[in-house]
Amino acid sequence: MRDTRPLLLESDFPPLRRGRLETVQVNLGYLCNLSCVHCHVNAGPQRTELMDLETVDQVLALLAGSGARVLDLTGGAPELNPHFRYLVREARSLGIRVIDRSNLTVLFEPGQRDLAAFLAEQQVEITASLPCYLEANVEEQRGKGVYEDSIRAIRQLNALGYGDTLPLNLVYNPQGPVLPPAQGELQEQYRQELGRRFDIRFNQLLTITNMPISRFGAVLLASDQYVNYMQLLRDNFSQANLATLMCRTLLSVDWRGYIYDCDFNQMLEMPLLASDRPRHHISELTPGAMFEGNHIVTGEHCYGCTAGQGSSCGGALEA
């Protein structure tokens, strides 16, 4: 698989500085029951990288001492980490808001039949990938049978109160090297189609731009679309999106416990510019040492977060 990393490291992207830490985003490992085309992590069923219990406890110590109020769990499929439920319970006991970035189909994996009930019991916010409301588009990105299982999973979550008293957000990713459509308009299309056909309820739709890294980056290179896609991102750069970029208030932790400015920098192995050290481990952090005011490491991929309406793990940046 060809790698876009060497093409992304040098950039003229505007300088950024970190603000006050609000969210700790943790990648619990690359193991996943799916292998999606747009995955920037290159996750899949054959991956073995998983965060161990010692590092999970270090995450909890960081949450207890940092002032961050949100734990954002991602992967792979984060639920497949054997310490997922322990981490959720302990974080919730600290009063931390927990977000589970789910692919939905994981609810039907062996050993996960009670997962939906556990998430509801712990009042975990679910942000679930459903890259389109049409079956053909979803299965082109994610594989045969995924759409049907995703719909079944959402209906199961709805029955537990998700989309009503518990927050359920859906995530849209474009097909191919294009920018997402307007988030608000697409959200209404999702509501109408999913409501009419399946009586499905959800709170918000989040649109996320495909990042030119890992698996999607390799697809761009193989199809000779990388240069055109990067030009599209640059041509649609919006200065207004700089103030609300997620990297300003987020700390990204990889499955080994090393920290980065964002999940995308993590995948590109671009560590924090906190000192002259090559990288920092979560175990070395002390309360208050959250690097507020430090420069954020940027690259060409950052144009993906600032193009058009903007993109972050919370969806579009522009209202």
Image (tube, helix red, strand yellow):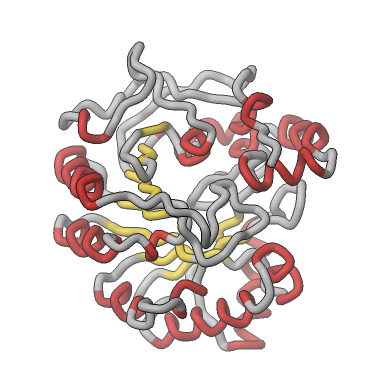
Q: Residue at x 36, y 24 (%)?
A: 279
- The count of marks equals 0
Relative side of 174 to 275, left or right: right
Q: Residue at x 76, y 48 (%)?
A: 178
Q: Quadrant of residue 174?
A: bottom right
Residue 99 is situated, as x and y percent measured from the top left of the image, at: 37, 59
Looking at this view, is 120 or 236 the one in front?
A: 120
Whether residue 142 is situated above or below residue 117 in the rendered picture: above
Q: Is residue 229 visible?
A: yes
Whether residue 219 is situated above or below residue 13 in the rendered picture: below
Looking at this view, is 31 or 167 the one in front?
A: 31
Relative side of 253 to 205, left or right: left
Residue 280 is situated, as x and y percent measured from the top left of the image, at: 31, 26
Q: Residue at x 67, y 79 (%)?
A: 193
Q: Quadrant of the N terminus?
A: top right
Q: Quadrant of residue 144?
A: bottom right
Q: Residue furthest top?
A: 276
Relative side of 17 to 105, left or right: left
Looking at this view, is 112 or 310 the one in front?
A: 112
Residue 316 is situated, as x and y percent measured from the top left of the image, at: 57, 49
Residue 294 is situated, as x and y percent measured from the top left of the image, at: 36, 20
Q: Is residue 170 visible?
A: no
